[in-house]
Image (cartoon, helix red, strand yellow):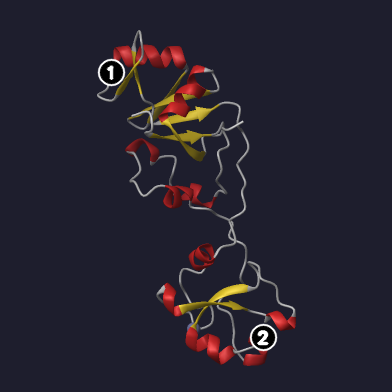
């Protein structure tokens, strides 16, 4: 039960991370985080003592037993000292390039199985093109063959969009296959998918 995932919010109530209940209790106990009580669209925060009395007043099925009392496991905590939006660059991996391009050939715009897509250097390497976000795109095999070792201009082809480093990281999608707890939904709506996320900002 202490491994249950807990959503971590920063001071601005933005979802920044997921930690274990064990870690959440450590942050709560040391005063570095408050537990968030969710329900009926309202949110109350509790420090450790107040969370402990809430647990006595309104017990839940899932509780942790300590030597002298039982305590509820929070679903959401807000970390008090952490106020920046965490930044971590999206790793430049094959998987993430396919994700960025939505498995779509960037020349003909059709969606393919990953096995039918290549990674293409927009400006070929022998023309000085780099291996980076701005110069690598997904390309289907026919487009790749047609383009050959030429720039798009030389091949008379056009990219459907300019390749860029992705600005987002869908951290929950990537990290957890589990469904979101009901109480998380308010914090993890589409707006938050555009915030750069990652790492463990609560780890010091
Ligand atoms: Zn194509």
Residue at image coords 45%, 52%:
174
Instruction: In the displayed orientation, state which residue is furthest to the right.
Output: 128
Q: In which quarter of the view is residue 122 placed?
A: bottom right
Is 100 situated left or right of 121 in this image?
Answer: left
Q: In which quarter of the view is residue 11 placed?
A: top right
**Mark 2 lies on residue:** 151
Is 123 situated left or right of 7 in this image?
Answer: right
Q: Could you say where residue 47 lies in the image, as x and y percent from the top left? A: 47, 17
Task: Return the disc, 2 or 1, that comes first in the chain's sequence.
Answer: 1
Q: Could you say where residue 106 lies in the image, as x and y percent from the top left? A: 53, 77
Residue at image coords 44%, 48%:
175
Residue situated in front as seen by the camera: 187 or 90: 90
Q: Could you say where residue 68 lies in the image, as x and y percent from the top left? A: 35, 7
Structural crowding at the residue carrying mark 2, measured as other residues with C-alpha within 10 Å and reported as few (<14), some (14–19) or many (≥20) = some
How far is mark 2 from mark 1, CA to CA?
A: 65 Å
Q: In which quarter of the view is residue 185 placed?
A: top left
Q: Secondary structure at mark 1?
A: loop
**Mark 1 lies on residue:** 59
- Residue 34's disc is none
């Amino acid at each position: 039960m202490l491994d249950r995932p807990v959503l971590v919010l920063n001071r601005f109530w933005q979802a920044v991370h997921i930690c274990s209940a064990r870690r959440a209790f450590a942050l709560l106990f040391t005063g570095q985080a408050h537990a968030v009580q969710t329900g009926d669209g309202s949110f109350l925060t509790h420090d450790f003592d107040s969370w402990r009395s809430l647990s006595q007043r309104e017990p839940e099925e899932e509780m942790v037993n300590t030597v002298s009392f039982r305590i509820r496991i929070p679903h959401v905590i807000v970390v008090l000292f952490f106020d920046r939006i965490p930044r971590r660059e999206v790793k430049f991996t094959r998987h993430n390039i396919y994700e960025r391009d939505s498995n779509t050939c960037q020349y003909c715009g059709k969606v393919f199985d990953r096995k039918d897509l290549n990674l293409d250097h927009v400006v070929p390497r022998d023309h000085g093109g780099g291996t980076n976000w701005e110069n690598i795109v997904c390309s289907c095999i026919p487009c790749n063959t047609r383009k050959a070792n030429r720039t798009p201009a030389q091949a008379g082809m056009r990219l459907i969009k300019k390749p860029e480093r992705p600005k987002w990281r869908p951290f929950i999608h990537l990290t957890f296959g589990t469904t979101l707890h009901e109480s998380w939904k308010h914090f993890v709506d589409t707006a938050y998918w555009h915030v750069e996320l990652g790492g463990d900002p609560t780890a010091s």
